[in-house]
Image (cartoon, helix red, strand yellow):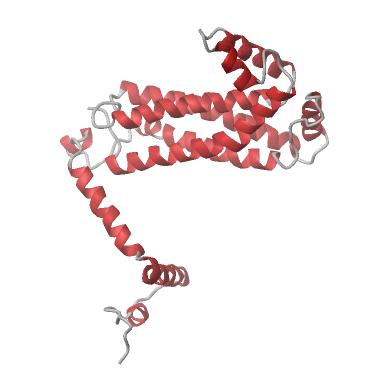
Amino acid sequence: MSLERKDEYDHGEWMREKELTPVEQTFLMTLIWMDKRFRIVDYLEILETLYYRVNLQMPKSHTEQYNLDNKFWYWYPLYALGSFSTIAYVVAALSGALLGFYYAPATTGDPSSAYNQLAFIMTDLNFGFMLRSIHRWAAQVMVAAVFLHMLRVYFTGAYKEPRELNWIIGIILISLTMVFGYTGYLLPWDQLAFWAGQIGVEMSLSIPLAGEWVAQLVFGGFSLGQATLQRMYILHVFLLPFVVTAVIGVHIAIVWIQGIAEPH
């Protein structure tokens, strides 16, 4: 007698009875294989139950109250701003990763070599000008889209209970986006980057009590140099992408659980 637990369902026979495409067969076979080892379906059912229980506690939206069949085409462009900013972030991340193959902060003590690398990317590298332009424009579009997205949330009242936590996360995200843009702004180490960095140092020094400590921590001192460029590079490439991606994931997950807050 075998001690192995018998499967209640004959998945192979069930799949043979269905007219499935190769893609569907591959997906189901993978899901069955994973479920037998990690109980994937059980966790999916738990998430589905949690989703419906939470949604039952949400107040009725405008379309639900007036039986509009979830059609809010007149608001759709404004409601696409969150997705638009996410797409811009993905484009900026991918183009930035490609730029990372050719750019590195100076390691010789002379930060001007960072500008020379940027000049090489813009003038000598095949499609380098296009790649850097895509990265720069994607970053600017993301900043604008996030700002407009926050305005839409505010003026449609989507920040109110029970969505106040996601509003706070959105404020954190727009702040991180600004830091993302600022750190990337300094990496070319041109005249714009230098004076933007100098403004940042002066603003840090103006902070009461902790000003000098903040300037030394963020900029590596009271004047710009190799330490400043190194810190901006580490923040922009090694810290902020992981933090922002994680926060975006939480933000989207909450929207998925609570649903879209339409104007009341």
Q: In which quadrant of the rendered image does the C terminus lie? A: top left
> Based on the displayed image, in which of its 4 quarters is residue 18 positioned?
bottom left
Query: Does residue 137 appear to the left or right of 51 in the view shown?
Result: right
- Residue 189 is situated, as x and y percent measured from the top left of the image, at 73, 22
Residue 110 versus residue 186: which sits nearer the camera? 110
Point 69% across, 19% down: residue: 193
Q: In which quadrant of the rendered image does the N terminus lie? A: bottom left
> Based on the displayed image, in which of its 4 quarters is residue 102 positioned?
top right
Point 58% across, 30% down: residue: 139
Relative to 81, residue 200 above or below? above
Residue 92 seen: no
Of all residues, the one furthest to the bottom in this rendering is: 1
Point 81% across, 24% down: residue: 110
Residue 47 seen: yes
- Residue 254 is situated, as x and y percent measured from the top left of the image, at 33, 40
> Based on the displayed image, in which of its 4 quarters is residue 13 positioned?
bottom left
Relative to 117, residue 98 above or below? below
Point 64% across, 38% down: residue: 96
Query: Does residue 212 appear to the left or right of 121 in the view shown?
Result: left
